[in-house]
Image (cartoon, rainbow, N blue to C red):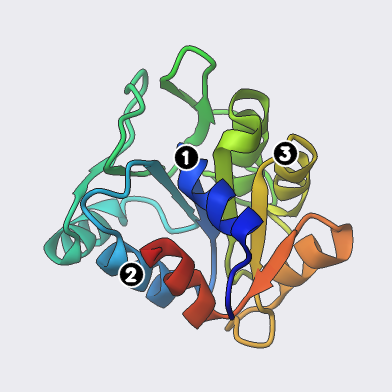
């Protein structure tokens, strides 16, 4: 797919790249991390559903294959460009207007903590058109409402093509809700990130 000038301009001007995913999304997360350029000039935030205490192995694996710095988010961490931040298990990750993260211990949303909806919703209030958000494979509807709020705020919103997702429910829910401005194949998601 050839991206039009409007999409390319919005991608290049975005300060933040948000990516949410659940069941079936690990391989694409891994490929995205591998393909991020060192000078991407964005804050990258990954929100993945996973089991408790599973982070250290993901961080280690991703770090071994990434060209930019990766870290698990801790409370009050400042957002930094050219860094991949991973939402920790057992907390919801919120983005504050002052440019830092805060962690929340409230109940799971869609049986998930971290919840993609919670992070996307907080980002919609902060970044508006300065954000690109991608929703990947997953077996529930987490992320769809948050993606809609981002789109309404002016962000570029993308859903993985459900026909390519191992679990189509999550991107399909976003599309049905009108939250996804673009529906991209795995190849096109990677192409955009390398642009």
Q: Which mark is first along the chain, 2 or 1?
A: 1
Q: Residue 29's spot in the image, x, y percent?
A: 40, 66
Give the side of residue 163 with respect to residue 70, left or right. right
Numbered disc 2: secondary structure: helix
Rounded to the nearest angstrom, the CA distance separating label 2 from label 3 is 27 Å
Residue indicated by mark 3: 154
Question: Where is 52 relative to 190, above or below?
Answer: above
In the rendered structure, the answer to whether residue 91 lies left or right of residue 185 reads left
Quadrant location, the N terminus: bottom right
Of all residues shown, which one is farthest toward the bottom?
163
Are discs 1 and 2 less than 8 Å apart at CB? no
- First along the sequence among labels 2 and 3: 2
Mark 2–mark 3 CB contact (< 8 Å): no
Residue 47 rendering spot, x and y as whole percentages: 48, 50
Mark 1: secondary structure: strand
Comparing 80 with 29, the one in front is 80
Residue displayed at 70% across by 51% down: 110
- The vertical placement of 25 against 78, above or below, is below
Counting from the top left corner in percent of width and height, residue 76 is at 36, 18
Residue at 39% x, 45% y is 44
* Marks 1,3: beta carbons within 8 A: no
Which image quadrant is residue 60 in?
Answer: bottom left
Residue depicted at x 47% and y 12%: 98
Q: Earlier in the sequence, mark 1 or mark 3?
A: 1
- Look at the image and tell me in which quarter the C terminus lies: bottom left
Which element carries disc 3, helix, strand or loop? Answer: loop
Label 2 sits on residue: 30
Residue bearing the label numbered 1: 16
């Amino acid at each position: 797919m050839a991206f039009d000038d409007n999409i390319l301009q919005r991608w290049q001007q975005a300060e933040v790249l948000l990516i949410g995913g659940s069941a079936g999304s690990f391989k694409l997360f891994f490929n995205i991390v591998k393909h991020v350029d060192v000078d991407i000039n964005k804050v990258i935030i990954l929100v993945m559903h996973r089991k408790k205490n599973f982070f250290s192995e993901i961080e280690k694996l991703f770090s071994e294959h990434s060209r930019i710095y990766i870290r698990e988010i801790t409370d009050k961490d400042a957002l930094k460009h050219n860094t991949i931040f991973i939402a920790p298990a057992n907390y919801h990750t919120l983005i504050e207007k002052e440019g830092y993260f805060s962690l929340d211990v409230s109940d799971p949303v869609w049986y998930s903590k971290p919840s993609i909806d919670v992070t996307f919703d907080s980002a919609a209030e902060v970044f508006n058109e300065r954000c690109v958000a991608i929703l990947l494979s997953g077996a529930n509807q987490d992320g769809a409402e948050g993606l809609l709020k981002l789109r309404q705020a002016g962000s570029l919103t993308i859903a993985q093509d459900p026909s390519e997702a191992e679990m189509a429910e999550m991107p399909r829910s976003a599309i049905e809700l009108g939250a996804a401005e673009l529906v991209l194949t795995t190849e096109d998601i990677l192409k955009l990130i390398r642009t």
